[in-house]
Image: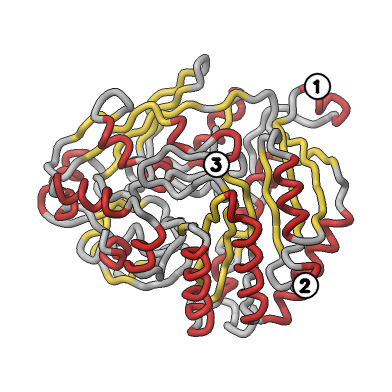
Amino acid sequence: MKLTGWGRYPVVETTVTAPRRETDLIEIVRSGHSIARGNGRAYGDCAVNPDTTVHMKHFNRMLSFDATAGVIVVEAGVLLADVIRICLPKGWFPPVTPGTKFVTIGGMVAADVHGKNHHKNGSFGEYVDWIDLLCWDGEVRHCSPETNPDLFNWTIGGMGLTGIIIRVAFRMLAVETGWIRQQTRVAANIDQAIDLFEAGLDSTYSVAWIDCMTRGASLGRSIIKFGEHAGRGHIEAQTPVVPLFSQPRKSRSIIIDFPTWTLNNLSVRCFNAVYFWKGKTELADSLVSWDSFFYPLDSILGWNRIYGRRGFVQYQCVIPLEQSRAGLRALLNCIAQSGGASFLAVLKRLGTQRGNFSFPREGYTLALDFPVSDRSLHLMKCLDSIVVEYGGRLNLAKDSRLSATSLETMDDRVDCFRHYRQKHGIDMSFFSEQSIRLQI
């Protein structure tokens, strides 16, 4: 069948299999090349193998949950949404979450996802106790910081290129309610935005919507939101608010592809202007649900159809802290001058990172969505050169078009990962369309 990531670009022809038993999974690995796939929420081609793509949807059981210690053991195909549904009413929430709850736990490990709290709490891998990994030789190895530590560390953030994750144990975060105390701040430009982020480093969560179409004194104007988990005392005045609840908002669905002309410079400028005005008029301090704070786009099922039949590319980079102001200015100026229309643009502050091949590093990460076109693909090549100039790198979980040469220039860890895979013969068993393109 023809398969894509969430961005619907590129399209890859592959054989998809969805085993139900571990023995069947072992047989697939022993018989040839493969890569694991979760719920298809990686944006590009990192979860597609040109020969065999292994869909993990049947490995979807929750195996145990220690409601005292907050340690949960799940199979890799379990959705984060289901973890929240089960655990939040018991007073536990994911310690790190990406921008959608429709990802699998195995995918969260493979991409070592980060969230709005990376500057303070790190990435998801910090909370993983152990992994059961189906390896290149058909053996299942138990991996942890103490047992098979090298394999454990390369698997977290390794994009599925060390083996197929079968089971994961990780620690949850104790919370008193499902509500978030949100503070909204307005930044007139990118410098003010960075100043607000730096002043708010004690906040647990922080994220900014950023207008990438403005220039001059308004370059990078932003709406920044800070958040903290609300305690029971914070919601007493909000009766009849339910303290712990796991029911998300009702979702609407987009069932058709939008025409390609829908997203253009004019429509994006209008959207940005309205969104900025709306953000300026919001209450500075408010109480919002966990679902609306962490997963705003999940309220629109199939939102990737907005970009049309050709799909879109998400471009997410991180610029080191000491170069962030100059690097972000250069990126935003390049986008504004090109007339490129990024419908969604998100800025976050990242902290230090220990993962062998994880995306984050201390600095600022900018995520942009571009409809697939010759112009936007050319623009992203220009953005690559700016990222290289300022010592940054790209998020492979979002990538669908980076070149091997650019990756080598951006990330000096590639050689180590490639050598590790070749040394153990892993590269002959597990690879993706992305790893082929990037020569990992």
Q: Nearer the viewer, mark 1 or mark 2?
A: 2
Q: Earlier in the sequence, mark 1 or mark 2?
A: 2
- Distance Cα–Cα, label 3 vs label 1: 25 Å
Return the mark for residue 216. 2
> How many other residues sit within 10 Å of disc 3, few (<14), some (14-19) or many (≥20)?
many
Q: Is residue 360 left or right of residue 364?
A: left
Disc 1 designates what residue? 233
> How many other residues sit within 10 Å of disc 2, few (<14), some (14-19) or many (≥20)?
few
Q: Label 1: state its secondary structure.
A: helix
Q: Earlier in the sequence, mark 3 or mark 2?
A: 3
Q: Quadrant of the N terminus?
A: bottom left
Disc 3 designates what residue? 97
Three-letter code, disc 2? Gly
Residue at the image point whose x is 45% and y is 50% from the top: 359
Marks 1,2: beta carbons within 8 A: no
Residue at the image point whose x is 61% and y is 44% from the top: 116
Residue 420 visible from this viewpoint: yes
**Looking at the picture, does residue 182 appear above or below residue 296?**
above
- Distance Cα–Cα, label 1 vs label 2: 44 Å
Q: Position of residue 313 (x, y in %)?
A: 49, 69
